[in-house]
Image (cartoon, rainbow, N blue to C red):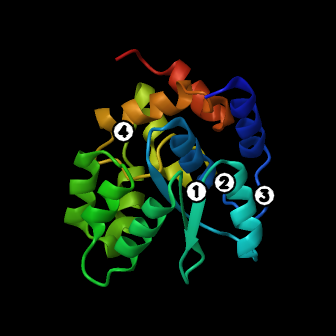
C-alpha cells in the first residue's frame, strides 16, 4: 500500500465517527491490514446509511447493512453480501460465519460447539481466565472497549493462532491505531 494511502487510512482510524464502536477499530485494523477479508460490526448510535457508506468508501471498502444495526465491511461488495446472507440464515450458521469472517479454525470450531446463542456467555467465561504474557493481547474481556487485538472469542487463553493474528495486527501498518494498552501488554509479555 502506498505511504500516503496508509497515512490517510490511519487518520480515519484515529478519528472515527461517533456511530462507530471502539471495538470496531480492532476489526478495521484486521481488515485494512489484510489479516481478515471481511468484518461485521454494530453501529452504536443513530446513523444515516449514506454517511456510513461514504466513510467506508474513504477506506476503500464497501458495506451492507442488516435490520439490527450491524454492517458488514469488505474490500469487495460480493463478500459483504455473502457474509450478510450467511448471517441472516435462520439455520445454525456459527461455523460458516466464523470461517467467512476469517477467524482461526480452532476458534471457529469451539464457537460452533458452543452455539451462537451462547457466545456472549462463553466470551464472559473465557474472558475470566488468566491470559499470561503476550497472550494478554487476545483477552476478549477488553474487546468492547477496543482493548483486545482480536475480535473473536479465542478457543483458549493460549490460542497460538489468535496470538499470531494479534501480533500481526499490532506490528502491521495500522497497529498504532490499536489501544496503547495492547502495545504495553505485548511488550511486557514473555517471549514465546
Work out whether mark 1 precedes mark 2 in sequence or the reverse, and give the earlier one.
Answer: 2
Work out whether mark 2 precedes mark 4 in sequence or the reverse, and give the earlier one.
Answer: 2
Residue 179 tag number = none
Which residue occupies 27% across, 54% down?
108
Tell me residue 164's x, y (percent): 38, 30
Label 2 Cα neighbours within 10 Å, binned few <14 / some 14-19 / many ≥20: some
Tell me residue 4's x, y (percent): 75, 28
Residue 144 tag number = 1
Label 4 Cα neighbours within 10 Å, binned few <14 / some 14-19 / many ≥20: many
Of badges 3 and 4, the one in the foreground is 3
Disc 1 + disc 2, Cβ < 8 Å = yes
Work out whether mark 3 precedes mark 1 in sequence or the reverse, and give the earlier one.
Answer: 3
Disc 2 + disc 4, Cβ < 8 Å = no
Q: Which residue is mark 4?
A: 162
Q: Please, what secondary structure does the residue beneath circle 1 have?
A: helix
**Which of these two is toward me, 69 or 127?**
69
Of badges 3 and 1, the one in the foreground is 3
Q: Please, what secondary structure does the residue beneath circle 3 have?
A: loop
Q: Which residue is mark 2?
A: 22
State which quarter of the image contains the C terminus: top left
Amino acid at each position: 500500500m502506498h505511504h500516503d494511502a496508509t497515512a490517510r487510512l490511519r487518520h480515519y482510524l484515529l478519528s472515527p465517527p461517533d456511530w462507530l464502536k471502539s471495538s470496531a477499530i480492532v476489526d478495521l485494523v484486521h481488515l485494512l491490514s489484510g489479516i481478515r477479508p471481511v468484518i461485521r460490526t454494530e453501529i452504536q448510535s443513530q446513523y444515516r446509511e449514506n454517511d456510513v457508506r461514504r466513510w467506508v468508501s474513504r477506506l476503500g471498502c464497501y458495506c451492507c447493512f442488516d435490520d439490527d444495526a450491524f454492517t458488514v465491511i469488505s474490500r469487495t461488495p460480493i463478500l459483504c453480501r455473502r457474509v450478510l446472507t450467511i448471517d441472516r440464515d435462520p439455520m445454525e450458521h456459527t461455523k460458516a460465519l466464523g470461517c467467512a469472517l476469517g477467524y482461526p479454525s480452532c476458534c471457529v470450531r469451539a464457537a460452533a460447539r458452543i452455539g451462537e446463542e451462547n457466545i456472549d456467555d462463553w466470551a464472559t467465561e473465557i474472558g475470566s481466565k488468566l491470559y499470561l504474557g503476550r497472550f494478554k493481547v487476545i483477552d476478549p474481556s477488553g474487546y468492547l472497549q477496543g482493548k483486545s487485538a482480536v475480535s473473536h472469542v479465542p478457543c483458549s487463553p493460549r490460542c497460538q493462532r489468535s496470538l499470531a493474528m494479534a501480533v500481526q495486527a499490532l506490528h502491521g501498518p495500522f497497529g498504532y491505531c490499536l489501544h496503547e494498552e495492547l502495545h504495553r501488554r505485548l511488550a511486557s509479555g514473555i517471549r514465546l
